[in-house]
């Protein structure tokens, strides 16, 4: 479709280095009106950096950016004004006016219509910071969709969307492209690429190593191009004994909208229990109650001295100290454990040793162990969080979207590690919005809807369609 | 005049300079810049109002000069916080020192006497207009912040300047305007002290009112009306102290002076729930 | 050591340490400084002033001047009395002077004033002038020194009008001008028509307050403040710290240093009221004559104005 | 040009800029800058006595600055060091005048009491924050005023020394004075104590689990909470410790310089110390350097006012300029790196 059209975005010889890394290495890229261009690659390959350069947010060391028309960017770690309402965020800078004042009614109506048109349900009057991460993602998307830029850059826009939402999201994107918008989308979900993209560029170590038409490649081919080889196999499921580990009964807690309402379930040692559900059905409340950071009613029982490894949902806000090094972050949450201290002192030898192990085992791409975490790519930050949660061989693991933002290769690695932990006798509670992930890992699947469990499936009796219906509250 | 009327009048007068400075604090912090320099900007306003009133023989240019001086230091803070990315608290502290030190020096340079200026033409009874204006401005600022596009953008800036960039606006410019306005308001508050309430500049005359205003901002939860209410409460306690002075024999004299502050502490403990500043308050962009 | 132009050989050298009020206090620090300036003009003295920012500065400031061998070192204000006592004992050959306090060392001349004398006159005048039989006193801080003003003033008023109401308030500070003004307004609004201020810079607020009032008066203090609001300042109770400072310096120059405790009052001309430049008409000859009678009675010792609240309680008006 | 810029970006360049600005101000005032600055530096460093005074000011600034550093690192904005210093001084002064123990024991006790006084004052604010969620900014600010009035009432009444003329306690007997560090100056071993606290603080921050928790809470409170740190406990503890350090400073002034408690023992050290802590980048060791720099200004400023007719508070002008220029220097440095 680009045919004879002129590119609207032209990147020439772009290079960007950070201390110790070449983030983008001599990249040429052009975007044509009406195309959906997928940019894929490993964590830390330089995708976000390239998108920021194209947007004009980051200045390249070298090279030129030519854009014909406005550029919009949906950030990987989105940029919203938390304590403003949804509509205020969406319409910021283009507020409908009545005289010198904002026409709030018109704004509200505008956002409702916009959301409906794009199949992204949202309450325009909600305060953004009270929304779960996935829904915040929609706000950022809507803001860009409403601005209708000639060039739209999307950095992992679907990382926090449910499958059904992804379909409607791409319907929107496709329609936009048909109206002439040039779209570049960064994603780790290769299925999306195959289904919706026209062209694909694969990045590795800052350079574009492959350019192809989506029609001429396959998911496996792409994955190999990204990783530079075959995907590591996920560890096999081994037989385990099922001693009781975590017991939750009649759990109530969380704020009204997204509370848990009378949850009862059990996770036994040596099994992975998957919580399937659409975001906003009480999963955060469940995870927070288990982490002990919100008040709750009901019973949460676990073995007295159980070591718990937690992977929270929001890596930057809840799991990491962004200004600290990997070494210091590797201890967070473990700093009171015997291994991390010598009396009142920090055990610096073990801290460094553990950090090194995390970096090695999870393939964290970083110039050094002392690199500041906020300078790591999103996926690599996630790997640090996952690695830290699993390093002490915990007997109970609560993992909330553990592979969010992680590339295909590393995802397989993380899933493999979870499986190994299970095989070695850990009880794993896996809360994930990726049904595929749950289906491949879980021994038992609980479907959560409106704060309660509405269905339970053993691994050998899974009915995918039925789960989908339960998740949507239809069955 | 009855005691009650005295008390009301005194409360309004005492609250006015704090209201001005607190409104300045609200607008600045809402844009994401912590304005520790309010005290210094009040000093600058008070000092230059006197200088210009002295030079021109008329208080109105003095008032303008006070506002301009506050705005100028607001601009310096804005420049430091936006362009030079100086830590805002450092910059504000520096401005406080520069203003108090500069005024002390200026007194010697201009009047050849340390401590206090000569007496100059003041607003006289017209200063009531400034009292009323303070409260009108509070209402106006409330409307501006919550009902106009500019207000929304400023608030967004204080929440997340990057969101503002993503929306195609320039957060640095927004912050600069907000902080300059903040300084102008603080300067007006200072000018009210020196040529409204009084008719001279005297060292230490702001007596920490800029910091009290900062407290009022927090008490008022970063809203113009809230901050004004808090300023009124501080004004009330200051006034109470005057009215009660000498009437309650069993209280030691300085316990009376401590009254506003103790009351503030008790009120503070009584306010339930955490008060949360704007998310990007103090965060450089 | 410090390098500065320094005194010429044989030049009279006078050093002064202010208290935390510092120069610009419109009170005894400024007044003492005027005395020093006069000594420079009239006696050709080399002078140096060190200001103190905190109580911890008194001792080093006094030591600094001591090490520089100033011929006379003035400690201005009672706050420094203990620091001075200590240093004076260590340097028995160095001459010192202190204002407003008594330091009993042989090499220190202590100068105190009978503020109650002048305050008594001020109180008497206020009582004669008051139309509401209600006057007031506005002090800086409630400390013994200020109670001398308060007691003398109240007694003087009772001398004229035994049933007069005298309200007493303290600002709590010597430099909060705004508070001084508000308190003066409170006093005026409650019916007092004359306010005597003894509050340093804070008193300037009271002077400001009286400007917009046509029938009320303020009485100033320490220096002649009459011109600050012509016609609205009845008079000022002048305390001639500058004269004392100058005299102490001149005595040194003449080789006859003063020592011991000088108590300066009305009869020494170190305390008194101003010349009523702007208010003479309003007061009128009859009241001035009566005031003069009282003045003579104090000078002659017939009236002994009280200097504490206790003495005030037992004070009996003397029928003249 | 680039060379010139990078020269300017050093701390020396920053100071040069301030000197130029100040010289202009002096010329306007009709004073020769040479006289003014030589008075400043000779007054601060020109001799043993001058150096002593500079270090005395350094010491007085260092305690509250280190206290502030601790609180700021925990994410707590303590602007109440002035009040904490005063309460520390009050505790030490009141006890010192009343108790008679063997000197070494008594002096140690007085310093500890200073820590207790300041610690209580900081702890109140910390407790209010932990218990009610009260803003520590307001609480510490208000407590400054309350401390000043409380101290004034106490030393005007019950604690007033028998021969004291102003608002102060009785004098400490000479055997209870903090030993002198530099003979023939007022410099006491308080300086050594302050430096020791700085070293300990640096060690706590970098090497202990408590320091780790404290920094985590300061950097990322939500992540810290989820890592199992009891934020409430940490809040009151940090503010109490912060106040205690400032309080020792008050006790050092009382036992080392003033030898009695007086309500005017500090010319605002607690506020200047905020600038010291920030200029020192909240790093205890750099804070020591910053305190020395400010000590020079404080002591030299006093000398400057003596020779030139410069008011005592004008030194704040220089301090403020230096703070701004030093802070902006980082930006210039970053820019020249890019260019
Ligand atoms: N501000 C920065 N400072 C230092 N290094 C940085 C900075 N931003 C990115 N990097 C480095 O640049 C490289 C590319 O990062 P980038 O975020 O572009 O990766 P990415 O392809 O988007 O990865 P992911 O899939 O994990 O999001 C990484 O090695 C990262 O550590
Ligand atoms: N403020 C919101 N704006 C837009 N979508 C939302 C919002 N809150 C939740 N949703 C989405 O709406 C759907 C239902 O979520 P919701 O929070 O309403 O579930 P619930 O808690 O089970 O229902 P309820 O809140 O009515 O009890 C989910 O897809 C969720 O992601
Ligand atoms: Mg990325
Ligand atoms: Mg819900």
Image (tube, grey):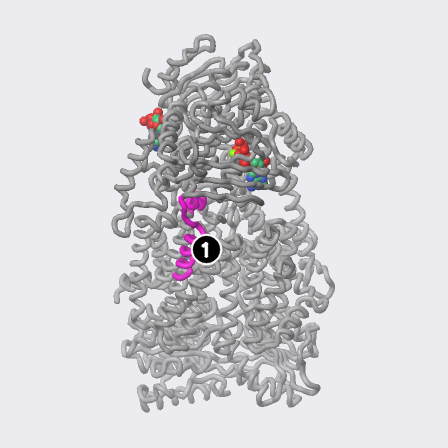
Quarter of the rendering containing residue C157: bottom left
Quarter of the rendering containing residue B228: bottom left
Quarter of the rendering containing residue C211: bottom left
Residue B163 lies within the magenta run:
yes
Q: Magenta segment, which residues?
A: B158-184
Residue at image point 68% right, 61% down? D187
Q: Is residue B28 above or below residue C103?
A: above
Q: Percent position (x, y) of residue B214?
A: 43, 54
Q: Is residue A212 above or below residue D297?
A: above
Q: Percent position (x, y) of residue D39?
A: 65, 72
Residue at image point 52% right, 61% down? D155
Q: Is residue C176 left or right of residue A328?
A: left
- Between B87 and C290, the one lying in front of the other is B87
Q: Main SS type for the magenta part?
A: helix
Residue holding disc 1: B35
Q: Residue furthest right?
A: D183
Q: Is residue D169 above or below residue C48?
A: above
Asked whether residue D230 is in view, the answer is no
Residue at image point 56% right, 61% down? D266
Q: Quadrant of the N terminus of chain C?
A: bottom right
Q: Percent position (x, y) of residue D281?
A: 59, 51
């Amino acid at each position: 479709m680009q045919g004879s059209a002129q590119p609207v975005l032209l990147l020439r010889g772009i290079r960007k280095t950070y201390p110790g890394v070449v983030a983008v290495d001599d990249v040429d890229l052009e975007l044509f009106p009406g195309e959906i261009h997928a940019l894929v690659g490993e964590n830390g390959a330089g995708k976000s950096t390239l998108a920021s350069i194209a947007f004009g947010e980051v200045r390249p060391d070298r090279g030129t950016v030519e854009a014909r028309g406005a550029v919009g960017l949906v950030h990987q770690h989105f940029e919203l004004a938390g304590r403003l309402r949804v509509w205020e965020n969406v319409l910021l800078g283009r507020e409908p006016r009545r005289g010198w004042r904002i026409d709030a009614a018109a704004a509200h109506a505008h956002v409702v219509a916009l959301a409906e048109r794009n199949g992204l349900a949202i309450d325009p009057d909600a305060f953004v910071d009270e929304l779960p991460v996935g829904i915040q993602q929609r706000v950022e998307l809507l803001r860009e969709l409403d601005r209708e830029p000639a060039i739209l850059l999307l950095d992992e826009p679907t990382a926090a969307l449910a499958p059904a939402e992804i379909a409607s999201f791409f319907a929107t994107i496709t329609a936009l492209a048909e109206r002439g918008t040039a779209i570049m989308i960064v994603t780790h979900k290769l299925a999306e690429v195959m289904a919706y993209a026209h062209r694909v560029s694969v990045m590795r170590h800052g350079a574009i190593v492959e350019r192809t038409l989506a029609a001429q490649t396959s998911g496996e081919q792409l994955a190999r191009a990204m990783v530079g080889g075959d995907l590591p196999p996920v560890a096999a499921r081994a037989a385990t004994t099922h001693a009781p580990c975590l017991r939750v009964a009649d759990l109530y807690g969380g704020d009204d909208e997204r509370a848990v309402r009378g949850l009862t379930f059990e996770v036994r040692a040596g099994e992975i229990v998957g919580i399937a559900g659409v975001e906003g059905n009480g999963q955060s409340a469940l995870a927070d109650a288990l982490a002990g950071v919100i008040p709750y009613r009901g019973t949460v029982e676990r073995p007295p001295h159980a070591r718990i490894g937690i992977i929270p949902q929001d890596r930057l806000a809840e799991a990491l100290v962004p200004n600290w090094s990997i070494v210091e972050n590797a201890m967070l949450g473990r700093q009171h454990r015997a291994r991390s201290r010598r009396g009142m002192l920090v055990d610096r030898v073990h801290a460094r040793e553990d950090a090194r192990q995390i970096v090695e085992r999870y393939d964290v791409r970083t110039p050094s162990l002392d690199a500041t975490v906020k300078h790591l790519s999103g996926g690599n930050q996630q790997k640090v969080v996952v690695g830290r949660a699993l390093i002490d061989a915990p007997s109970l693991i609560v993992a909330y979207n553990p592979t969010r933002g992680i590339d295909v290769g590393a995802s397989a690695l993380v899933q493999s590690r979870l499986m190994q932990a299970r095989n070695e006798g850990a009880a794993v509670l896996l809360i994930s919005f990726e049904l595929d992930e749950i289906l491949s890992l879980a021994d038992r699947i609980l479907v959560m809807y409106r704060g309660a469990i509405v269905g339970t499936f053993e691994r050998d009796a899974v009915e995918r369609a039925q789960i989908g219906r339960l998740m949507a509250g239809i069955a | 005049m009855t005691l009650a009327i005295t008390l009301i009048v005194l409360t309004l007068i005492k609250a006015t300079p704090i209201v001005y400075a607190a409104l300045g604090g609200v607008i600045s912090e809402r844009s994401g810049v912590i304005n520790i320099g309010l005290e210094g900007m009040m000093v600058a306003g008070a000092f230059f109002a006197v200088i210009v009133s002295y030079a021109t023989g008329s208080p109105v240019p003095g008032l303008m000069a006070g506002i301009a001086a506050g705005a100028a230091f607001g601009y310096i803070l804005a420049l430091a916080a936006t362009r030079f990315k100086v830590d805002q608290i450092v910059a504000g502290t520096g401005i406080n020192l520069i203003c108090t030190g500069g005024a002390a020096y200026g007194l010697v340079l201009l009047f050849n006497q340390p401590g206090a200026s000569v007496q100059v033409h003041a607003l006289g009874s017209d200063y009531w207009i400034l009292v009323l204006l303070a409260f009108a401005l509070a209402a106006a600022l409330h409307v501006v912040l919550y009902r106009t596009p500019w207000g929304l953008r400023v608030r967004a800036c204080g929440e997340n300047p990057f969101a503002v960039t993503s929306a195609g606006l320039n957060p640095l410019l927004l912050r600069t305007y907000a902080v300059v306005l903040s300084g102008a308001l603080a300067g007006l508050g200072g000018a009210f002290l020196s040529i409204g309430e009084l008719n001279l500049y005297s060292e230490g005359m702001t007596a920490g009112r800029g910091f009290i205003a900062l407290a009022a901002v927090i008490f008022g939860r970063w809203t113009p009306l809230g901050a004004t209410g808090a300023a009124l409460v501080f004004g009330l306690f200051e006034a109470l102290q005057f009215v009660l002075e000498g009437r309650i024999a069993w209280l030691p004299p300085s316990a009376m002076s401590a009254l506003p502050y103790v009351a503030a502490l008790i009120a503070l403990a009584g306010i339930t729930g955490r008060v949360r500043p704007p998310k990007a308050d103090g965060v450089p962009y | 050591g410090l390098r500065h132009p320094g005194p010429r050989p044989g030049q009279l050298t006078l050093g002064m340490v202010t208290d935390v009020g510092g120069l610009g206090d419109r009170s005894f620090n400024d007044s003492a400084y005027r005395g020093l300036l006069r000594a420079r003009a009239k006696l050709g003295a080399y002078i140096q002033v060190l200001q103190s920012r905190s109580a911890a500065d008194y001792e080093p400031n006094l030591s600094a001047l001591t090490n520089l061998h100033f011929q006379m070192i003035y400690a201005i204000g009672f706050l420094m009395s203990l620091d001075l006592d200590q240093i004076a004992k260590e340097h028995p050959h160095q001459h010192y002077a202190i204002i407003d306090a008594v330091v009993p060392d042989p090499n220190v001349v202590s100068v105190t004033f009978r503020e109650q004398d002048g305050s008594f006159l001020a109180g008497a005048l206020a009582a004669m002038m008051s139309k509401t039989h209600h006057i007031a006193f506005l002090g800086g801080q409630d400390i013994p020194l200020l109670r001398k003003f308060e007691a003398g003033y109240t007694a003087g008023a009772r001398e004229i009008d035994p049933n007069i109401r005298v309200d007493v308030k303290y600002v709590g500070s010597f430099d909060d001008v705004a508070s001084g003004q508000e308190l003066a307004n409170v006093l005026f609004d409650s019916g007092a028509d004359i306010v005597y201020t003894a509050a340093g810079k804070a008193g300037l607020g009271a002077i400001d307050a009286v400007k917009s009032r046509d029938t009320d008066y303020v009485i100033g203090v320490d220096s002649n403040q009459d011109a600050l609001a012509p016609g609205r300042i009845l008079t000022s109770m002048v305390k001639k710290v500058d004269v004392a400072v100058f005299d102490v310096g001149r005595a040194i120059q003449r080789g006859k240093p003063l020592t011991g405790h000088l108590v300066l009052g009305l009869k020494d001309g170190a305390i008194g009221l101003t010349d009523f430049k702007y208010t003479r008409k309003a007061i009128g000859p009859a009241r001035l004559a009566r005031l003069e009678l009282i003045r003579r009675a104090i000078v002659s010792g017939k009236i002994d104005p009280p200097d504490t609240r206790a003495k005030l309680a037992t004070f009996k008006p003397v029928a003249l | 040009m680039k060379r010139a810029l990078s020269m300017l970006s050093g701390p020396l360049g920053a100071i040069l800029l301030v000197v130029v600005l100040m010289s202009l101000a002096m010329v306007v005032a009709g004073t020769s800058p040479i006289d003014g600055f030589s008075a400043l530096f000779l007054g601060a460093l020109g001799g043993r006595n001058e150096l002593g005074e500079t270090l005395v000011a350094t010491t007085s600034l260092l305690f509250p600055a280190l206290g502030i550093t601790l609180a700021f690192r925990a994410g707590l904005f303590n602007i109440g060091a002035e009040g904490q210093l005063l309460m520390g001084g009050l505790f030490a002064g009141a006890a010192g005048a009343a108790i008679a123990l063997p000197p070494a024991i008594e002096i140690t006790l007085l310093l500890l009491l200073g820590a207790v006084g300041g610690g209580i004052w900081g702890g109140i604010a910390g407790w209010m924050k932990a218990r009610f969620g009260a803003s520590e900014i307001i609480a510490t600010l208000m407590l400054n005023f309350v401390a000043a009035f409380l101290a004034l009432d106490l030393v005007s009444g019950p604690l007033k020394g028998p021969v004291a003329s102003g608002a102060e306690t009785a004098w400490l007997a000479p055997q209870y004075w903090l030993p002198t560090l530099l003979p023939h100056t007022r410099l006491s071993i308080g300086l050594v104590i302050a430096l020791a606290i700085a070293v300990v603080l640096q060690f706590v921050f970098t090497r202990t689990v408590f320091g780790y928790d404290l920094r985590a809470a300061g950097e990322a409170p939500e992540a810290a909470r989820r890592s199992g740190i009891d934020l409430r406990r940490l809040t009151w503890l940090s503010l109490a410790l912060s106040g205690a350090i400032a309080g020792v400073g008050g006790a050092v002034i009382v036992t080392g310089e003033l030898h009695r408690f007086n309500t005017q023992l500090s010319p605002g050290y607690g506020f200047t110390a905020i600038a010291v802590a920030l200029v020192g980048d909240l790093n205890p060791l750099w804070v020591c350097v910053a305190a020395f720099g400010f000590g020079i200004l404080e002591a030299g400023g006093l000398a400057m006012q003596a020779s030139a007719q410069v008011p005592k508070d004008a030194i704040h002008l220089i301090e403020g300029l230096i703070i701004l220029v030093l802070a902006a220097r980082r930006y210039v440095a970053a820019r020249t790196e890019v260019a």
